[in-house]
């Protein structure tokens, strides 16, 4: 046993890879130690791997030193270093070159975007050779196209708003001049009334412009729980005196109660602009009907009248800002009410359409949106 132990440890030391000596301990059936190497008594599981073998009354215990991390890394380095040195020029270097060349189109696209002026919304004018980048370039060009269209709409809106505000402001200036230089009480009273009407029109236009700008910001809707039927009834009760003064019949058909969760301000914008539009254009003796319906998954608001109506060919244009139509010259208004109503309906998640009105006359403004009880 002693010779075997010496030979084994001698071979380990000659190999130069395995640290330390293997410790041996041989015991007989009575548990007496027959043979043990010098370090066998100190070998434990914390420093050695232990193994026991039994043969008849004999018990052999082997303890091999544990390998440290440094030893294992040294083995791996000695075995793999040559392979890594060979693989680097043959595998890693071509791989790095391929990745660098593959990223070049993406870098070119990023550089072209970074060099663009903030006011430049023209197309990129770049068609990448790689199929993976073509959707990116196309999506970016589509975004620029939508931004150009939005900017054009905003410019047109500013121009139209300036034009619309110029008229009441000119009237205000003229009537103020007449009021200051009026030669009689009647002239002064007439100038004051005209000045007051011009100021009301300018104030109404300013409020509508602010409302439209708020809706165009696209902020998330602030919903609240409310009884929609009660809300519509209260709103129409406030408009009833105006309808009676104009000789109009204003009616409501709605459920007794309709609890919902929705953006109150957006809904009121839709309702009040629809009804206000009808009250402006329907002549005396006419009828304005408001209907509120609740479906399985949708809510429907319908404001119908028997007034002059809107020709089918002009119904889509009626929602454009400052559109007045053929009857617009005879009725007071700004041409923003229906545009505000459409934006408010979009805030509710719905869409607006124009259909025929009461008894085949006039028109009906219908908005339908998903219900959230």
Image: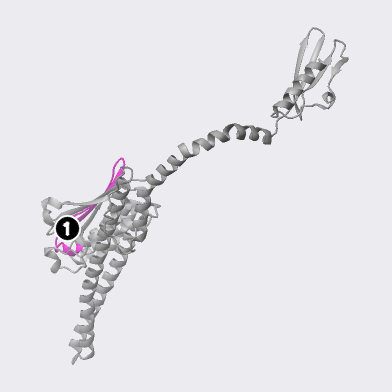
> Residue at the spot x=21%, y=71% of the render?
164
143 in relation to 185, above or below: above
SS of the residue at dot 1?
Answer: helix
Which quadrant: the C terminus?
Answer: top left
Q: Which residue is mark 1?
A: 317
Start and end of the magenta stretch?
279-306
Residue 217 in percent (x, y) is at 34, 60
Badge 1 density bin: few <14, some 14–19, many ≥20, Cα 10 Å: few
Q: Residue furthest top?
A: 56
Task: Name which residue lies at 18% across and 91% down.
Answer: 184
91 vs 197, nearest the viewer: 91
285 within the magenta span: yes
Residue 369 percent coordinates (x, y) = 29, 48
Depth check: give the residue in front, 102 or 257.
102
Q: How is the image coloured?
A: one colour
Q: Quadrant of the N terminus?
A: top right
- Write down the quadrant of residue 123 in the picture: bottom left
Residue 245 position in % (x across, y down): 20, 67
Instruction: Tell me if residue 15 comes above or below residue 284 in the rendering.
Output: above
Q: Quadrant of residue 231?
A: bottom left
């Amino acid at each position: 046993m002693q010779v075997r132990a010496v030979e084994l440890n001698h071979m380990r030391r000659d190999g130069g890879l395995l640290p330390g000596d293997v410790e041996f301990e041989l015991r007989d059936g009575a548990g007496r130690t027959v043979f043990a190497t010098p370090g066998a008594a100190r070998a434990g599981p914390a420093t050695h791997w232990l193994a026991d073998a039994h043969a008849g009354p004999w018990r052999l215990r082997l303890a091999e030193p544990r390998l440290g991390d440094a030893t294992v890394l040294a083995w791996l380095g000695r075995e793999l270093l040559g392979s890594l040195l060979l693989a680097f020029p043959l595998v890693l270097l071509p791989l790095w070159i391929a990745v660098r060349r593959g990223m070049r189109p993406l870098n070119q696209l990023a550089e072209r975007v970074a060099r663009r002026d903030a006011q430049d919304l023209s197309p990129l004018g770049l068609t990448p050779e790689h199929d993976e980048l073509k959707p990116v370039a196309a999506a970016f060009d589509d975004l620029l196209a939508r931004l150009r269209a939005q900017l054009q709409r905003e410019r047109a809106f500013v121009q139209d708003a300036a034009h619309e505000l110029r008229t009441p402001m000119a009237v205000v200036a003229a009537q103020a001049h007449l009021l200051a230089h009026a030669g009689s009480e009647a002239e002064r009273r007439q100038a004051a009334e005209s000045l007051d009407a011009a100021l009301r029109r300018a104030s109404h236009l300013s409020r509508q412009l602010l409302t439209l700008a708020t809706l165009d910001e696209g902020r998330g809707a602030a919903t609240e729980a409310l009884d929609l039927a009660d809300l519509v009834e209260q709103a129409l009760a406030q408009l009833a005196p105006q309808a009676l003064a104009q000789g109009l019949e204003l009616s409501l058909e709605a459920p007794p109660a309709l609890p919902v969760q929705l953006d109150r301000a957006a809904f009121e914008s839709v309702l009040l602009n629809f009804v206000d539009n009808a009250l402006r254009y329907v002549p005396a003796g006419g009828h304005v009907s408001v209907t509120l319906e609740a479906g399985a998954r949708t809510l429907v608001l319908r404001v119908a009248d028997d007034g002059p109506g809107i020709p089918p060919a002009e119904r889509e244009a009626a929602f454009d800002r400052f559109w007045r139509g053929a009857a617009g010259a005879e009725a007071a208004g700004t041409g923003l009410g229906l545009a505000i109503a459409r934006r408010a309906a979009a805030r509710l998640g719905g869409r607006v359409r124009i259909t025929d009105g009461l008894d085949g006359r006039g028109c009906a403004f219908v908005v339908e949106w998903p219900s959230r009880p």
